[in-house]
Image (cartoon, helix red, strand yellow):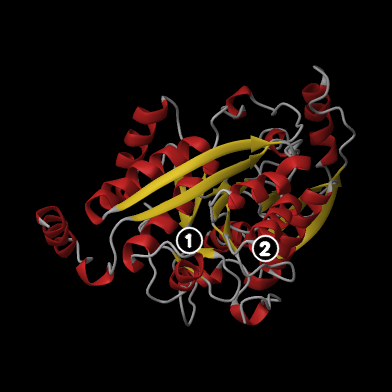
Amino acid sequence: MRGRFGSWILASALGLANTVPAWAVDVKSAVLRVAYQELLPISRFDLKPQDLGFAGAALADEDNSTTGRFLGHTYETVTQSVAPEEAASAAAELVAQGVPYVVVIANGEDTARISDTVAEAGGIVLNAGARDNALRGQGCRKNLLHIAPSNDMSADAVAQFAMWKKWPRWVLVEGSNPADQELGQSYKRAAQKFGAKIVETRIFEDTGGTRRTDSGHVLVQRQLPTFMQDLPRHDVVMAADGSDYFAAYLPYHMWDPRPVMGAAGLRPVTFHPAHEAWGATQFHTRFEDLTGRYVHEEDYEVWLALRVIGEAVTRTGSNDPETLRQYILSEDFELAAFKGQKVTFRDWNGQMRQPILLYDDHITVSVSPQDGFLHQTSPLDTLGQDRAESACTAFQ
């Protein structure tokens, strides 16, 4: 009894005593990363570490256990990398083993399939990778919560900064692949939403030579200045390159000197290793001590996903998926995320509200939402589709 009494004293000091009705709660989660056959990135600096995402899970378990050990809560997270054709069966096996919370790093199609599989067992999927707008719209799932921002959110974050800088005339350069085209649609939507004018849209065709041969980058660098000739007067170039094959070459290879934003130049990210404001330095210190490397967005999003579960368990004293889901989507939920304000969830489509950092590969240049972009509920809801725009019906 003395141990529980001591824990109750600590819980009282943390303001948690009245929110923890039970002891000895075991929380089992998994991180499922789908491994795709991909080309090497344009730059060696963009090579992905083998423990991508999994490192974030390790730090999250440490953080959750810091409070959990005093409250009788234990956290266990398994990590697994699978081929796309094995993703659904791997998820089914996890929930069959009593793991109701699955954090997924995958594309939109596989995220949806995994979510449907986990839903059959009453579990929850937390999306830490897919940016597809459809997963927050017509393709939403009741058991699918989004930690990763949508393409619309990221485009809105960039658009707000451009308009705040009074750069309303845009040239949009899209890739030719489906992922590029969806991202391009998000920038077109953002321009209409915030009053920018896209003076011209150009499509840069993926001919397969950009990263498949040693001479590919030389070819792209030679093509771009000519490709960018004879444009109307413009303030900024928006790059919609969801496939990562041309945007990195845009800065310094254009005909007219203009800022590049979007997929290169000034990029919207959830987190990056140079971000130090709002206590982020201590996050980086702990992550780097644990892993020996810098954090990636996937690491941060996995960490944030598992911290969402940990915070909900702490506040409810339960490990029941539906109990936690209802709390996470309620007005009572909030979580510190080292980005200047606490994050919450949209109860109409399961998307996490969060600030978006605008990063130039060296510093945080700005953070969206920008000052002056107002909303009747939260300025964070100026990023992405608002309640009235949402086509999601699963949460009604």
Residue at point 51% right, 50% down? 270
The residue sitting at the top extreme is 214
Q: Amino acid at mark 2?
A: Glu
Residue tagged 2:
120
Please indicate whether residue 259 sits to the left or right of residue 290 in the image: right
The image's mark for residue 256 is none
Please indicate whether residue 278 sits to the left or right of residue 79 in the image: left
Q: Nearer the viewer, residue 81 or 42?
A: 81
Q: Earlier in the sequence, mark 2 or mark 1?
A: 2
Q: Secondary structure at mark 2?
A: helix
Is residue 121 visible to the viewer in this orientation of the structure? yes
Tell me the crowding category of disc 1: few under 14, some 14 to 19, or many 20 or more residues within 10 angstroms, Cα based.
many
Q: What is the distance, in whole Å, between disc 2 and disc 1 at their CAs?
A: 29 Å
Asked if labels 1 and 2 touch by Cβ distance under 8 angstroms, the answer is: no
Quadrant housing residue 340:
bottom left
On the image, the x and y values in percent for residue 12 come to 15, 65
Q: Nearer the viewer, residue 134 or 87?
A: 87
Q: Nearer the viewer, residue 349 or 87?
A: 87
The image's mark for residue 354 is 1
On the image, the x and y values in percent for residue 93 come to 64, 46
